[in-house]
Image: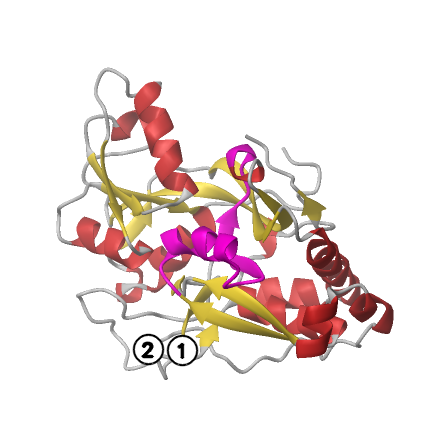
Amino acid sequence: MNPLLRRRPVALLTAAAATCALATACGSSDSGTPKSDSTIATQKQDAALNAKLPADIRKAGVIKVGTEAQYPPFESLADDNKTIVGLDPDLAAAVGQVLGVKLEYTNIAFDGLLPALDSGRFDMIQAAVTDTKVREKQYDFVDYFMTGQAIVVKKGNPDKIAGVSDLCGRPVAVLKGSTQLKMLEGFNDKECASDAIKVTALPTDKDALLQLQTGRADATFTQDAVGAYNVKNIGGGNQFEIANSEALLPTPVGIAFTKADTQLRDAISAAITEVIKSGAYDEILAKYSLSGGAVEAPSVNGAVD
């Protein structure tokens, strides 16, 4: 267990909103997207931390952030289908207040985020990205959350799936370019070597859930916090459930930077530390019922695999 983990991630986290993202309509007229209005206290600007930002960012007053806004409760589109809301935008707003700059989000496909960082389109990537040792060979991470993995199945778990071994030979949907995809590929090399999981990788987590909903997949494999949110909120909680009783393979979630951008990396890490100290970090996690993944302090390159 990562020593920074304050409380063990659990499989059945809750969230207050409901979502109508899939083919079957929700039982409420409320779209249920996490609200953009925030009750989080305004953070005090720290002039010393502002001075630690790269000169071009201080001059522009903006940090360009790449994200993929189809991954609630971390980030999703509000009812206006334009505003990006969720845990990550709330945390970014608080960090920006500490640093005295604006964090400006752009929504693109998940598998395009790291290439866009490489090209200089973005200064950093914040999209519930799992920090792994493989990714750390090319990028630096500031880790700010811990999450396990969830096997999401249809309500009632008709195939009696309980763990990784029960996925062998079955069709499983997953987010393209995700760590969860790499994990499934790893299972096919080990636990399921004699009867491989039939993996389908899709552009969004919503697409993966649609595969499950329509019977083209027996399960999806996703971050525990995201799986729990979807289980509770899609279809009034009557469509899906999490098959595994304990979150699998806890991993850190982090903000990604190029290896050359250590100055921005360290400024962001210091700002998150201040947001944690102020109590706003705990307020933000509580707002999205994600307190189980809280860390005592951010870490740089804290991958566990």
Horizontal and vertical percent for residue 212? Answer: 20, 49
> In the rendered structure, which amino acid carries the disc numbered 1?
Ala
Q: Is residue 147 left or right of residue 239?
A: right
Q: Residue furthest left?
A: 215
Relative to 25, say whether 258 is above or below.
above
> In the rendered structure, which amino acid carries the disc numbered 2?
Ser
Say which quadrant the N terminus sits in: top right
Q: Provide the residue span drawn in magenta.
A: 108-134
Magenta region includes residue 113: yes
Relative to 227, say whether 303 is above or below.
above
Determine which residue is flagged by label 2: 31
Q: Are marks 1 and 2 in contact (CB under 8 Å)?
A: no
Which residue does the image show at 20% across and 41% down from the upper left?
Answer: 218
Which residue does the image show at 50% across and 50% down from the upper left?
Answer: 129
Determine which residue is flagged by label 1: 78
Which residue does the image show at 60% across and 56% down from the upper left?
Answer: 291
Q: Residue furthest top?
A: 194
Say which quadrant the C terminus sits in: top right
Q: Residue furthest right?
A: 48
Total numbered labels: 2
Which residue does the image show at 30% across and 63% down from the upper left?
Answer: 234
Q: Is residue 191 visible?
A: no
Choose between 254 and 31: the one closer to the eye. Answer: 254
Q: Is residue 217 visible?
A: yes
Choose between 142 and 66: the one closer to the eye. Answer: 66
Horizontal and vertical percent for residue 282? Answer: 67, 62
